Amino acid sequence: NLTGTVVGNLPETVKNVTHPQSVAMRERVEEVVQRSLRSILGAQFTEKEGERLIARAYNPRLPEKENAIRVDRLLTQLDQAYKQKVDAAKYFEKKGTLEGWQGKMPSMADFDPDAKGGAPARIRWEDMK
């Protein structure tokens, strides 16, 4: 009972008392995402972008199963971006430059499902049947 239509539609003041585990889970997701993005993206990361990303990745009104899928996908993206950043740092340590490095530096767009076609820009009713 961490997410879903009933829990997700409760006012925060009520949820803090009746479903503290739900509030704690949402706050943990927010903390991990914000801390990870800040360390991966540095100055590229803004609080507003982080809030939008978290809202897409974790919606308390959706079923727990859907939120688990979304958060897992985001964690995979964070892990891949972190590995790219570490790979770039190792290459730079060894060569003194990033010239010739074959990787891609992570950007905020890497975490936007619309930018990579991960989610349709417009959902049609026919697609939902």
Image (tube, helix red, strand yellow):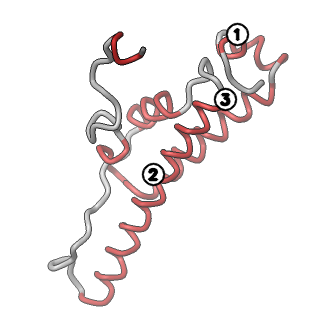
Seen at 66% across and 35% down, the residue is 27
**How far apart, in angstroms, are the residues tagged by discs 3 and 2?**
26 Å
Seen at 27% across and 41% down, the residue is 116
Q: Amino acid at mark 1?
A: Leu
The quarter of the displayed image where residue 106 is located: bottom left
**Residue 121 percent location from the top left of the image:** 27, 24
**How far apart, in angstroms, are the residues tagged by discs 3 and 1?**
16 Å
The quarter of the displayed image where residue 8 is located: top right
Q: Which residue is mark 3?
A: 64
Q: Is residue 21 above or below residue 19?
A: below
Q: Which residue is mark 1?
A: 10
Seen at 30% across and 82% down, the residue is 91
Taking the image as shown, residue 76 lies to the left or right of residue 21, namely left
**Residue 29 percent location from the top left of the image:** 61, 40
Image quarter (top left, top right, bottom left or bottom right) of the C terminus: top left
Q: Nearer the viewer, mark 3 or mark 2?
A: 3
Q: Amino acid at mark 3?
A: Glu
Q: Nearer the viewer, mark 2 or mark 1?
A: 1
Does the CB distance between marks 3 and 2 fall below 8 Å? no
First along the sequence among labels 3 and 2: 2
Mark 2 neighbour density, 10 Å: few (under 14) some (14–19) many (20 or more): some
Q: Going by the picture, which residue comes out furthest to the front? A: 129
Residue 99's disc is none
First along the sequence among labels 3 and 1: 1
Q: Is residue 51 above or below residue 109?
A: above
Taking the image as shown, residue 127 lies to the left or right of residue 71, namely left
Q: Going by the picture, which residue comes out furthest to the left? A: 99
Q: Which residue is mark 2?
A: 38
